[in-house]
Amino acid sequence: MNDSLRIFLIIILFSSSFTSANLFFEGNLAYGHANAPVISSAITSATNEITVTFSSRHNINQTSVSRSDFSISGDGVSGLSISSATGTGNREATITLSGDVSVGTITLEVSGEIQNSHGDASLTSGTTSVTNNGGDNTAPTMDSAITVTTTRIDVTFSEDLDASTINASDFGIQGSNGVSAAAENSAGVVTLTLNSAIDTGDTPTVTRGSGSCASNSISDLVGNTMCPTTLTATDGLSPTFTAERTAVDVITITFSEDVDADSSNETSAWTVSSGTVTATSDPANSDSMTIIFSGITDTTSTPTVTYVAANGTVDDGAPGNEVSDGESAVATDGVGPTVTITSSSGSSGATVNSSTLSYTVTFSESVSDFVIGDITKTGNSTSVVSNFAGSGSTYTFNVDITSDGSVIVQIEKNVARDSLSNKSTESNIYSLSSSSSSSSSSSSSSSSSSSSSSSSSGGGKNNCDSNGFGKNNSLRVYQVMYDNETNEVQVHAYSTCGSIQTKMTTPMQQSILGLSTDQPLLDDRIVVYSGFLDESDEKFNISIQNKRDSFSETFYIHDKSISKSYTGETGYTSEQQGMTLPIITSEQITIVSEPSVTQIVQTIEESIAIQEQILDEPLEAPKVQSITYTPEPIAEKEIKPQCGAGTKLVDGICKIIKTDEPKFCFLFWCW
């Protein structure tokens, strides 16, 4: 018998011998028949159930499934037993346990036979691992989000998450430039750290994931993956505030968002260190309020403002979002220095027998930029401010009186600044009246001795014409000019009541403007005065006064030339109104000297009315200052040119002296 025939007979014999066994081989496992049921999966479908899914060519015979067919083991089912087992589908069986499964492994052992629907094949015994999800097949959801700080948002999920599946890149925050970190700090609560801060009143949109559910990474502990979600965060931030001391007794509170209060005067809800709160305003759905307090006079003090939640109701309208108890802020210094004028010569309102009044100016803190031109002096006496001195917070000055009357001094607001550039407040008004025998005597003698005198300094005669430029108007200022290249200051003015004294004051010095050597406008009753500033000067004050009227104004340079003209309703014809003044030429005019003027003292009844017209740039409001009259320099002689060698003076011009002597020349030599 050959080998082929032998193999064929063996196969036939083997087949006929095991027909009744109906064995089916699949890998290393043997099943009874090719149509026998095979377990494809087992999973905890509920907290106390396991669902077994079969695969076969035919459905299972559900009646063949019984509790005795299965047994369980593993730490996920420790202490549990099988209560029942039934066929629940064509290819499924449900095993009910005596209790809920726990986290851990579960092994299912098939110990009996489960037949197919034809009853001709049965499942052979074996074991399989159960996928233990605790019966949870539901994906987690993102339920809420709340702002905790301006850079933190807490997001709450429906269940605990697998921390390894959480990434910052999975989240987006409206109004912020991204999330820098995301971590589950407690079960089901993920804290998001923002790259940039949001406002306290913001409720940003929080986005988790994109695309399909399957493409998202975040999952619960049993692997259920959540779908993309978007929701709006609620406002969980309490308002914060800053404080600024804007007046001696006022602090302005600025909140981080709009707030409101139940009462318009919650004085017990706020404290000011070293002070006493006397009143508060209602923010009334705005971001600011004021606190009125007492007890602090030092303008440099920066008290701390604190909120007492138990006594207040300031919130942003969201539940629980009241200003935090103990929230505080140090008030910044926004208070300008206060200023007080006192006098050793007498109490304000008194009449004193003195020709020199002494004053002290006291600021509440050290200041800068305070100069003599910042002192405003009015009244009906003839007087001048002098002997200005001081620094820091204390300054002194005198007022020298040459005729009896009232002297009223005051410091206007905004003339000085503290170290933080806060401008000073307005001072008190200090008024004294002078009634000195010495000044009265001087007035009488000087009046009699000067009745026939005249002066060319101001262009006016000494017999005072108080109505030279209209009713009660004896002084006319036509123009003030400053040349930024030469630093020269020129003043064009004229007086019909005695000569003019023109004083120029800078923060560093005072000087008297003299008569300019060029006087081209005398025929128009205009006298030119001139002087020079230092290159470092940034402002200057011009004070002009005759025996009756006065003029004062401060000019700010700003690295530009200045030309400011003045017109008035008196002293001009209609053709002259608003006309440009004649141009000053370089021609030299000889000024004829006139008799010197004996000082005349007369009470100034009212100041000149000046209508200003700014030609170059806006200037700050003038500060009126009265200046005493003193005789001005008078040109005493004509200045003649000095001619050099070979020239002579002819009609005021140096000319070359010509000779008629013959010259002898040879080629290009002459002698």
Image (tube, grey):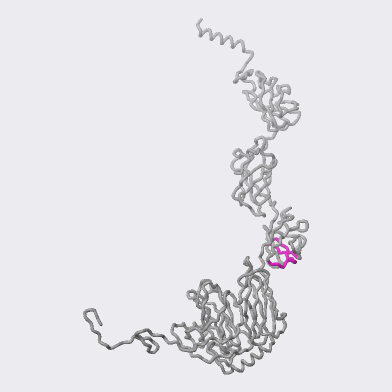
Side of 79 where 27 appears, left or right: left
Q: Quadrant of the C terminus?
A: bottom left
Q: Is residue 543 visible?
A: yes
Q: Quadrant of residue 280?
A: bottom right
Q: Residue furthest top?
A: 1
Q: Quadrant of residue 382?
A: bottom right
- Can you give x and y, in whole percent of width and height, for residue 609 in the image? 60, 83
In the image, the segment drawn in magenta is: 279-299
- Can you give x and y, in whole percent of width and height, for residue 303 in the image? 71, 62
- Can you give x and y, in whole percent of width and height, for residue 349 in the image? 72, 81
Is residue 294 shown in magenta? Answer: yes
Q: Is residue 523 visible?
A: no
Q: Residue furthest left?
A: 667
Q: Residue furthest front?
A: 671
- Can you give x and y, in whole percent of width and height, for residue 42 in the image? 67, 28
Query: Above or below — where is 493 with respect to 363?
Result: below
Number of numbered tags placed on the structure image? 0
Task: Name the one closer to the observer, 143 or 262.
Answer: 262
Query: Above or below — where is 426 with respect to 221?
Result: below
Query: Above or below — where is 660 with respect to 271?
Result: below
Query: Above or below — where is 56 with respect to 545?
Result: above
Is residue 394 shown in magenta? Answer: no
State the residue at coordinates (68%, 73%).
Answer: 362
Task: Name the one closer to the observer, 648 or 44.
Answer: 648
Task: Name the one closer to the observer, 350 or 661.
Answer: 661
State the residue at coordinates (67%, 87%).
Answer: 404
Task: Name the one closer to the observer, 179 or 671.
Answer: 671
